[in-house]
Image: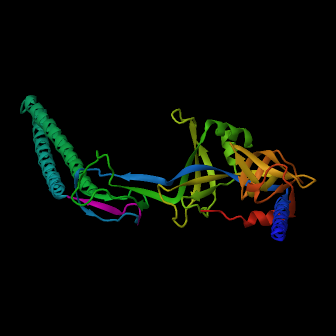
């Protein structure tokens, strides 16, 4: 019995020793990847939400009232200036045109009759005048004949005026018939067609028949708040706003799916005043659209480039945040880590551009910092800065 107790005691002591050795091993320094803080020249971007519009957007409306009898185009179709888009009912208009044309013929007949009356009155004057000169008849008869000529000439003038009015009426009714064919005011892409065959339309309708957009080039509209605008004025070279705009670099357009539009854009104009309701000022950037990828009403983001020369950078994976404060772990000479507060200027391509808190040449823990605590001793495993940054894949 004593021997058994001795054996059990020895086994228990052995197991306890093994556990202590294992715990001592687990409490020892662990390996962590580290990188050396570098200086780099980077280009970051400030993004502004933007809306896309064609360089010309033209609402198409009817010039006369009538029922749509034909819709000659489809949504999204490219049309040329002057191309027929809609046809309106013209029965009454055609009747008015015929009546106006008959009015011209009647007015012309009245001119002919009035001219004949003038000629007859003038013949009478010519016949009486020699007789008056010879005192054969009274001068009163000549005056009466001359008055008849003047009256006939006045009637001729009225007939000619009526003829001009008849021509004007005809042109007006003919124009109305022409207006029954609604044509494209510009070359562009047809927008929505909210009104179909049988709809009654007119010039006072609030809803246009469609909208034509010239999207050979497009405008991207975006806004800055007042603070951003003032910073913009301070940083960009130039004495005047137009001069500053000319000195601006080209900008990128990020589309709604996250891809970057192939063409570079140029900021062209800025509105002349701050919008009091929003506190913003609007900019306009122009983009070529040779392949018609962009459409009227597209959305996206303007990416405005900012150069960071000789800037202190560390990998994104080397930072963590608590209560809005950003930290990184610096490796000391004894391989103990210290969490250091850093001020972040920007984040570009998986790198953090540091304003203050660390300096070039410092060594920071690059990965796995979630389990670290201050003053923890580690086994440093240096890795390449660039290879680490390039290996980080975005998560969608």
Residue 310 appears in the picture as rendered: no
* Residue 33 vertical position relative to residue 64 in the rendered view, above or below: below
Question: In front: 298, or 69?
Answer: 298
Frontmost residue, 312 versus 141: 312
Q: Specify the quadrant that holds the C terminus.
A: bottom right
Q: What is the residue that sits farthest to the left in this orientation?
A: 137
* Observer able to see residue 196: yes
Q: Quadrant of the N terminus?
A: bottom right
Q: Is residue 198 left or right of 271 when viewed as pictured?
A: left
In which quarter of the view is residue 389 placed? bottom right
In this view, the residue in front, 283 or 347, is 347
- Give the percent coordinates (x, y) of residue 327: 76, 47
Give the magenta part as a residue range.
78-89
Describe residue 17's horizontal placement relative to residue 325 as left or right: right
Q: Check if residue 80 falls in the magenta segment.
A: yes
For the point 90% across and 55% down, the residue is 335
């Amino acid at each position: 019995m004593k021997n058994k107790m001795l054996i059990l005691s020895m086994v228990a002591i052995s197991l306890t020793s093994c556990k202590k050795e294992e715990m001592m091993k687990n409490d020892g320094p662990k390996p962590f990847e580290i990188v050396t803080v570098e200086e780099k020249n980077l280009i970051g971007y400030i993004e502004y939400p933007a809306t896309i519009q064609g360089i010309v957007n033209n609402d198409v409306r009817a010039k006369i009232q009538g029922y749509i009898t034909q819709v000659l185009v489809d949504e999204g179709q490219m049309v040329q200036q002057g191309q027929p888009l809609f046809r309106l009912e013209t029965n009454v208009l055609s009747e008015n045109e015929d009546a106006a044309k008959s009015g011209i013929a009647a007015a012309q007949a009245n001119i002919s009759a009035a001219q004949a009356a003038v000629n007859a009155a003038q013949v009478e004057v010519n016949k009486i005048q020699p007789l008056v000169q010879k005192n054969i008849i009274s001068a009163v008869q000549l005056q009466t004949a001359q008055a008849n000529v003047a009256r006939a000439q006045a009637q001729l003038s009225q007939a000619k005026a009526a003829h001009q009015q008849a021509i004007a009426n005809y042109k007006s009714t003919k124009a109305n018939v022409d207006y029954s064919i609604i044509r494209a005011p510009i070359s562009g892409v047809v927008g929505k067609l909210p009104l179909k065959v049988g709809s009654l339309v007119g010039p006072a309708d609030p809803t246009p028949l469609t909208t034509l957009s010239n999207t050979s080039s497009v405008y991207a509209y975006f806004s800055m708040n007042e603070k951003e605008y003032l910073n913009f004025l301070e940083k960009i070279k130039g004495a005047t706003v137009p001069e500053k705009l000319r000195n601006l670099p080209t900008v990128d357009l990020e589309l709604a799916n996250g891809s970057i539009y192939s063409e570079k854009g140029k900021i062209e104009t800025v509105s002349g005043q701050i919008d009091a309701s929003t506190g913003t000022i609007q900019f306009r950037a122009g983009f070529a659209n040779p392949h018609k990828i962009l459409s009227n009403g597209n959305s996206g983001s303007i990416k405005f480039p900012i150069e960071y020369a000789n800037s202190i950078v560390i990998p994104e994976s080397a930072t963590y945040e608590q209560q809005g404060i950003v930290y990184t772990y610096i490796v000391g000479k004894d391989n103990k880590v210290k969490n250091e507060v850093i001020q972040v200027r920007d984040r570009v391509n998986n790198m953090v551009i540091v304003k203050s808190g660390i300096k070039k040449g410092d060594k920071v823990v690059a990965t796995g910092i979630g389990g670290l605590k201050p003053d923890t001793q580690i086994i440093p495993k240096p890795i390449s800065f660039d290879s680490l940054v390039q290996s980080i894949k975005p998560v969608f």
